[in-house]
Amino acid sequence: MRLFHRSRARWGGDEFVHEKVEAGGPVATLSGDLHHYSFPSLSSHVAKFNTFADLFVAQQKARGGRFSFFTAVFRPAGGSFGPT
């Protein structure tokens, strides 16, 4: 099920990792909860997480980012998701 009209919105954001729908018109807010169960099992979730991790590393390399042990260990705990 889609919650937007395909001719009035498009995918945007970072390539492959943080895609988002960008609407070219008015946007409304749903009044109830929207449950999104995108992973049928824990193993499928871990597999997708590993894919996203590989894509993130490729993006960082393309942007000239370097590996930092300190950042890899402590950044997830701090909740910062900006560029390294």
Image (spheres, rainbow, N blue to C red):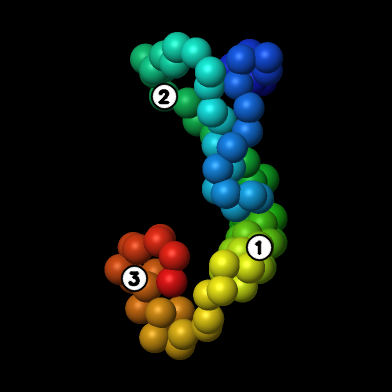
- How many residues crowd around disc 1 within 10 Å: few (fewer than 14), some, or many (20 or more)? some
User: Do labels 1 and 2 touch, CB within 8 Å?
Assistant: no
* Precedes in sequence: disc 1 or disc 2: 2
Res 44 → quadrant: bottom right
Tell me which amino acid carries mark 3: Ala
Tell me which amino acid carries mark 1: Leu
Q: Please name the residue that numbered disc 3 is placed on.
A: 77
Q: Is residue 71 above or below residue 25?
A: below
Residue 38 image point, x, y percent: 62, 41
Q: Please name the residue that numbered disc 1 is placed on.
A: 55
User: Residue at the left extreme?
Assistant: 78
* Precedes in sequence: disc 3 or disc 2: 2
Quadrant showing the C terminus: bottom left
Q: Please name the residue that numbered disc 2 is placed on.
A: 33
What residue is drawn where x is 53% and y is 18%?
24
Q: Which mark is residue 84?
A: none
Tell me which amino acid carries mark 2: Asp
Q: Is residue 65 visible?
A: yes
